[in-house]
Amino acid sequence: MTPNPEMLDELLKDCKTPKDVESLYSRLLQRVVHLAPGAAPPEAARAGPDGALRAGPAFA
């Protein structure tokens, strides 16, 4: 499934800062991990100090 521009606009409409985008990304990643039972998170994914999943070098 390819997200359409309207879907992305809806997801991002309340994001005002990079921290907002980071939070949205974290929630989406958690949702994907929970929807894929038995699937291991990507090697780069890890829990941040708040317990939320983080991924990639931007969150190091």
Image (cartoon, rainbow, N blue to C red):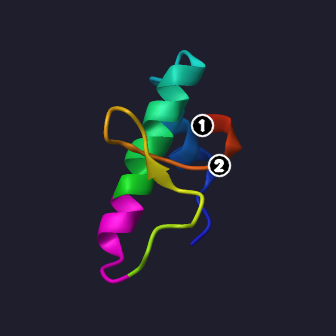
Does the magenta-highlighted stretch encompass residue 33?
Answer: yes
Quadrant containing the N terminus is bottom right
Residue identified by numbered label 1? 59
The relative height of residue 52 versus residue 43 in the rendered view (above or below) is: above
The relative height of residue 36 versus residue 46 in the rendered view (above or below) is: below
Q: Residue at x 52, y 56 (%)?
A: 45
Instruction: Tell me: 55 left or right of 48.
Output: right
Residue 27 picture location, percent across and down: 38, 45
Residues marked 2 and 1 touching at CB (< 8 Å): yes
Query: Is disc 1 surrounded by few (<14), some (14 to 19) or many (20+) residues within 10 Å?
Result: few
Q: Residue at x 56, y 16 (%)?
A: 17
Decide whether the magenta segment is chiefly helix, strand or loop. Answer: helix
Q: Amino acid at mark 1?
A: Phe
Q: Amino acid at mark 2?
A: Gly
What secondary structure is marked by label 1?
helix
Residue placed most toward the observer, 53 or 30: 53
What secondary structure is marked by label 2?
loop
Quadrant containing the C terminus is top right
Does the magenta-highlighted stretch encompass residue 13?
Answer: no
Residue placed most toward the observer, 19 or 15: 19
Residue placed most toward the observer, 1 or 22: 22
Instruction: Tell me: 42 left or right of 35.
Output: right
In the image, the segment drawn in magenta is: 31-38
The relative height of residue 41 versus residue 7 in the rendered view (above or below) is: below
Query: Is disc 2 surrounded by few (<14), some (14 to 19) or many (20+) residues within 10 Å?
Result: few
Residue identified by numbered label 2? 56
Q: Residue at x 36, y 77 (%)?
A: 36
The relative height of residue 44 versus residue 27 in the rendered view (above or below) is: below
Residue 21 picture location, percent across and down: 53, 30
Instruction: Tell me: 59 left or right of 51.
Output: right
